[in-house]
Each structure stands twice: as structure tokens, then as C-alpha cells.
């Protein structure tokens, strides 16, 4: 890997969620560049073909039907959020639902509602419901349309890792306000964007992030996009 190292728990972001909502996803940064921007992250690939998960030096493409492949260094990423995650707190938690993640973050630091929080959850999950976007069928197809034909899979009694970010409400449109989390199985056999989760006891590592570095595309597609936040559509698509 090349380039300056990311400072611990600073967040790097390429492009805006609103750009995906407007269908801007032809090009971006290469996988090799994202690998210099931290040890965990989320995003998508060109034409929004699947979900992206960055974990400890590798970038994975989480595909429809839950398939997983390691991405090559030159593959394009039109949107990503990453961090050099350094654990500030680690606890064993029960996840009765996805809401329990928010509760655990608040228990760790209840004065970070308007800051970013990052986390990593590992262990055995009783149940996971995950989605993957199948990709654009034409240039400029908006994310809201892709959400209507996404692949949804359910997993029971699986061992793996969830990477997540909690983004404050004031950043909606730049990113996904609230929880945004992706899952990958330990054996790399499955993964996706997490819609629902249950676990009796898993390890949850957390950190607060107050520094955000955004790199914007300079393409004609990006500059022609309206980039207006539709809160209802974002919530419907990102779950």
C-alpha cells in the first residue's frame, strides 16, 4: 500500500450518498486507493454492482444471492466510507434486534449523538437478514430503483463480522444517517448489507470519530447531478 497513513478513527469518504441516489456510479477511486484509507469500510462498486466491505487489508464485493469475491486493485469504487479503526471500548452484547447496536453505542458514549461512531462486531449470529444491490441496468439508474429489485438473503447460526458506521442526522445525504452496516462470514461464503440481526452474545468493539475527510468526484456526471436529499427514499433504500 502507498500514500499517507490514515489517522486513527478519522473517517475518509469518497463521493456522496446523494450521488448514488442520482445514479452517479460509473467511476470513482480504485480499490488500491481505498486500501490506504483504513482497515475497515463500506461502499459499493461501479454501476452499484453489489456491496463493498473493507476489512483488514482486503476489499470484498458482496454480490447478489450472498456470494462474496475479493476485489482486484484496479476495480472502481464510486462511493465508500472507511476508517483506521482503533478500539476505544469492547463489550460482549446481546443483539435482540438491530436497535440494540444503537443502544450499545449510547451506553459507551451518550455524548456522541452528533458525532460519528464506528464499530466492529464479531461472533455467532442467530439470524441475519442481508440485502445486496444487483447493479444498474442502464447508466444513471438511481439507487431508489435498484432497491426495488435487490437480492435479500437470510442466514441462521453463522459466524462472521459486521462492520458499521453510525452517521449523525445532520449528515444525511452526505452519508446514510443512522446505522449502516455490512456483514461477511468468517469463511467468506456469504455477506451483504444488514437489514436485521439477532445474536445471544457477540463481541462489539467501538470508537467515536469526530474528523471527516470527504473527497468529491470531479466528473461531468457528478457535476450534473441534483444531489438533493430525499430523506424518505434514503430510509427506504438503506433500511
Image (cartoon, rainbow, N blue to C red):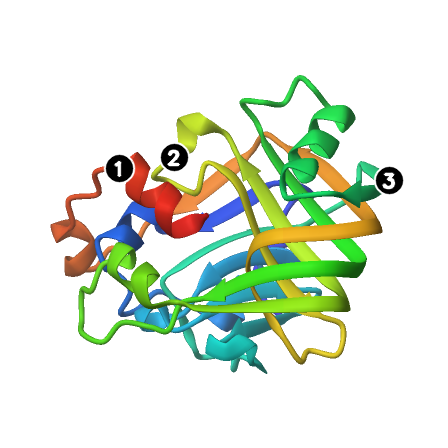
For the residues labelled 3 and 2, say whether their Cβ atoms are less than 8 Å apart: no
Say if mark 1 contacts mark 3, CB within 8 Å.
no
Q: Which residue is mark 3?
A: 91
Residue at position x 46%, y 76% in the image: 64
Q: Secondary structure at mark 1?
A: loop
| Res 235 visible | yes
Measured as percent of width and height from the top left, residue 238 is found at 42, 50
Question: Residue 24: where, in percent of width, then height?
Answer: 24, 59
Residue 35 visible at all: no
Residue 229 tag number: 1
User: Cα distance, mark 1 to mark 3?
Assistant: 35 Å
- Label 2 neighbourhood size at 10 Å, few (<14), some (14-19), many (20+)? some
Q: Nearer the viewer, residue 114 or 12?
A: 114
CA neighbours of label 1 inside 10 A, class few (<14), some (14 to 19), many (20+): some
Residue 237 point in image, percent of width and height:
37, 51
CA–CA distance in space, label 1 to label 2: 7 Å
Residue nearest the observer in this picture, 128 or 172: 128
Mark 1 touching mark 2, by CB under 8 A? yes
Mark 2 lies on a secondary structure that is: loop
Farthest residue to the top: give it: 111
Q: Earlier in the sequence, mark 1 or mark 2?
A: 2
Quarter of image, res 186? bottom right
Amino acid at each position: 500500500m502507498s500514500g499517507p497513513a490514515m489517522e486513527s478513527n478519522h473517517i475518509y469518504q469518497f463521493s456522496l450518498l446523494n450521488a448514488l441516489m442520482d445514479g452517479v456510479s460509473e467511476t470513482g477511486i480504485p480499490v488500491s486507493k481505498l486500501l490506504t484509507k483504513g482497515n475497515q469500510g463500506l461502499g459499493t462498486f461501479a454501476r452499484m454492482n453489489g456491496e463493498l466491505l473493507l476489512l483488514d487489508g482486503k476489499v470484498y464485493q458482496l454480490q447478489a444471492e450472498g456470494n462474496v469475491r475479493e476485489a482486484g486493485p484496479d476495480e472502481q469504487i464510486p462511493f465508500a466510507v472507511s476508517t483506521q479503526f482503533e478500539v476505544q471500548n469492547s463489550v460482549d452484547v446481546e443483539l435482540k434486534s438491530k436497535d440494540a447496536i444503537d443502544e450499545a453505542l449510547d451506553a459507551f458514549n451518550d455524548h456522541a449523538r452528533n458525532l460519528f461512531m464506528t464499530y466492529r462486531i464479531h461472533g455467532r449470529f442467530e439470524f441475519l437478514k442481508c440485502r445486496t444491490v444487483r447493479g444498474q441496468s442502464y447508466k444513471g439508474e438511481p439507487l431508489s430503483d435498484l432497491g426495488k429489485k435487490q437480492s435479500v438473503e437470510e442466514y441462521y447460526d453463522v459466524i462472521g463480522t459486521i462492520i458499521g458506521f453510525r452517521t449523525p442526522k445532520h449528515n444525511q445525504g452526505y452519508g446514510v444517517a443512522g446505522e449502516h452496516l455490512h456483514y461477511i462470514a468468517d469463511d467468506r461464503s456469504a455477506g451483504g448489507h444488514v437489514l436485521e440481526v439477532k445474536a445471544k452474545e457477540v463481541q462489539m468493539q467501538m470508537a467515536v470519530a469526530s474528523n471527516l475527510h470527504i473527497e468529491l468526484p470531479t466528473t461531468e456526471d457528478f457535476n450534473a447531478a441534483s444531489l438533493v436529499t430525499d430523506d424518505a427514499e434514503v430510509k427506504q433504500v438503506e433500511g
